[in-house]
Image (cartoon, rainbow, N blue to C red):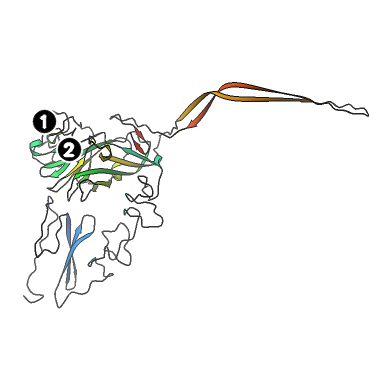
Amino acid sequence: MPAGQGTVYVTTGGGGRELTAVGTSSFTAHAEAGFHFTRASVDGDLLLLQMIRVDGSIGDWTTLVKGPGVPNATCGDGLVNQAGETCDGADRAACMGSCQSDCTCAPVCGDGAVNQASEACDGNADAACPGLCRADCTCGTPSEFVILAPIADTYIEAGTEAGWDHGAATFFDVDAKPTGIAYLKFDVSGVPAEVVSARLTLHCTNSSIDGGSVYPVGSSGWIEGDRTGTSSASAGGPGLKWTDVDTNADGVIDGLDTSPFVPDFVHGIRMLGVVTSRKSVTVDLTEAFRSGPGLYTIAIRNDASDGATYVSREGTAASQRPQLRLQLGGPLAGSTTTSSTTTISSSSSSTTTSSSTSSSSTSSSSTSSSRTTSSTSSTSTTSSTSSTVPTTTTTTLPASGSSTYQAGVRA
């Protein structure tokens, strides 16, 4: 058909219910499984179609033109339409900050790379101070951070295991077929200061193109349970189950269910993105932990039939268990700060006491004289002395899960 004639139909996916693996063929230009939307930009006879991922980056694009040819794409034309561009002017959805003149995103604190003179670290790029990177990309001290383990975690699953308790499992699944939702509960009731940042780290044991999205849960009154979910015996456990949350028994957990443990799917916090087996993933959940002291529950749900699996708090390797790292700011209103000291007694110290007496007199006659006498006595005595020596400040947080936390250390 001659150029510029006929009708061109464009079919796009990416906004459906769940993600599935995609294949390729001899005529495939780009293949990717991921949530996205398609943006159509029309400029005269030029139609630009772009695949926009949830993080604002562009996965693929194509152009359709009426007329003799496609005009050359250039940096500065206001569209991200060529390799090497992450932004172009106002078209900067993938940037945390502004777009630079070379059509790349300007570096900012929070982009996960140490790329400014003012930055000593940035998120996981913390080689200069491992585990101590502040939200402002400077290195902090151990006393500014608290690492919390969940006081409970579990997952619920639709289908055959809908009535099972998985609370004692060494892992938790997030999946779309059958649907599996993970729950983690954290006790922040004893944290003595404002939470400046909160970052959750999970260790993945099963790769997925969708590691899940994190959602807040309004109630933390659920029970973890004591069954592993490995057999039908788990059906008798006391822990949270799918049937407890899916109150209308329609096989879907959503706003139609009346359970207080339904995640708030309207106000998602963060997406974990692609996750890889035997690697850890960290996600910023600061906005979920800014309501002051108390219990917090988060849920993780994914939308891929190829689900992800993470190590739970019952996992064999302690280093792979979930952990929430909090950066603390100033003390909370009405809170008091105390410092701990250790008194050390000694009964073997030796003290030498010295005394001196001096007296003098002068006559008023033509001949004057003065007399000075002095005496010194030295005694050796053994006494018991006490000195107070400051020690490392420890913050003990009373928790319903009997957890004790030390600044910078998980007990």
Q: Quadrant of residue 6?
A: bottom left
Q: Residues within 10 Å of mark 1 (few under 14, many from 20)?
A: some
Quarter of the image where one finds residue 93 = bottom left
* Placement of 158 over or under 239, stated as above or below: below
Please give the residue where the numbered disc 2 appears in the rendered image.
155
Identity of the residue furthest to the right in this view:
366
Pick the residue in front: 29 or 151: 29
- x then y, percent, for residue 257: 14, 38
Front residue of 168/384: it is 384
Read off the residue under disc 1.
Answer: 235
Q: In this orientation, does residue 356 appear?
A: yes
Which secondary structure lies at badge 2?
Answer: strand
237 vs 282, left or right, is left
Q: Is residue 186 left or right of residue 388?
A: left
Residue 94 screen position, x and y as percent: 26, 58
Q: Are marks 2 and 1 in contact (CB under 8 Å)?
A: no
Q: Residue at x 8, y 74 (%)?
A: 5
Q: Mark 2: few, some, or many residues within 10 Å (few <14, many ≥20)?
A: many
The spot of residue 268 in percent (x, y) is 22, 46
Task: Give coordinates of residue 187: x percent, y percent.
Answer: 29, 34
The CA span between labels 2 and 1 is 14 Å
- Disc 2 or 1, which lies upstream in sequence? 2
Name the kind of residue labelled 2 in the image.
Tyr
Secondary structure state at the residue bearing disc 1: helix
Residue for point 28% across, 36% down: 149
